[in-house]
Image: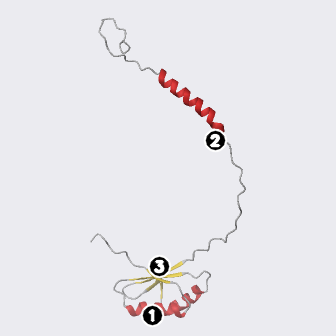
């Protein structure tokens, strides 16, 4: 009759109250365990760590974006520039330490002659880091 309750009409029904005594017992046992083990977590091991020196991380060089549209017009970091003044800009940029990376962005229909002239001008004026920027291939097709 542990599951029954006291009622006046004599029908046996399940007890509607929750017995929380086992839950309180478990929580008290856990509390005692944590009180006993907490000082063990604060015990530290004394170590003498080695010292090391390293060189500072090298500066990441700036990048120059040189865009060439379909008509052959040049844009140095989105600013219009002519092929004649491009040589002086390359010479100035090649003297910087560390040397910036030249990123060529050319339209698909740009004549190769213009790209070759830009690359020759960059090489003649001391630029050594030249990269080409393209769109990734569309795999979904």
Q: Which of the labelled discs sits on residue 78, or is there none?
A: 3
Image side of residue 47 versus residue 64, left or right: right
Q: CA distance from mark 3 to mark 1?
A: 19 Å
Asked whether the residues under the numbered discs 3 and 1 touch, taking CB atoms below 8 Å apart as contact, a structural biologist would say no
Q: Is residue 34 left or right of residue 108?
A: right
Residue 94 vs residue 83, the one in the foreground: 94
- Report the side of 61 relative to 2 (left or right): right
| CA distance separating discs 2 and 3 | 59 Å
Location of mark 1 (residue) = 117
Residue 7 horizontal/vertical position (percent)? 34, 8
| Residue ID at (50%, 92%) | 121
- Which quadrant holds residue 108? bottom left
Position of the N terminus by quadrant: top left
Classed neighbour count for the residue bearing mark 3: other residues with Cα under 10 Å, few (<14), some (14–19), many (≥20): few
Looking at the rendered structure, which numbered label has been put on residue 44? none
Helix, strand, or loop for circle 3? loop
At mark 1, the secondary structure is helix
Name the image quarter holding residue 18: top left
- Answer yes or no: do the residues labelled 2 and 3 have beta carbons within 8 Å? no
Front position among marks 1 and 2 = 2
Determine which residue is flagged by label 2.
41
Tell me: 21 left or right of 36. Answer: left
């Amino acid at each position: 009759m542990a599951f029954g309750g006291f009622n006046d009409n004599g029908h046996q029904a399940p007890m509607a109250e929750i017995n929380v005594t086992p839950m309180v017992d478990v929580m008290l046992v856990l509390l005692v365990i944590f009180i006993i083990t907490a000082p063990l977590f604060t015990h530290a091991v004394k170590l003498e760590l080695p010292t090391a020196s390293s060189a500072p991380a090298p500066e990441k060089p700036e990048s120059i974006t040189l865009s060439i549209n379909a008509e052959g017009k040049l844009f140095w970091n989105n600013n219009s520039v002519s092929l004649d003044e491009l040589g002086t800009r390359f010479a100035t940029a090649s003297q910087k330490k560390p040397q910036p990376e030249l990123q060529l962005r050319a339209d698909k229909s740009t004549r190769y002659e213009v790209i070759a002239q830009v690359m020759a001008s960059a090489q003649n004026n001391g630029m050594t880091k030249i990269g080409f920027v393209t769109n990734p291939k569309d795999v979904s097709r």
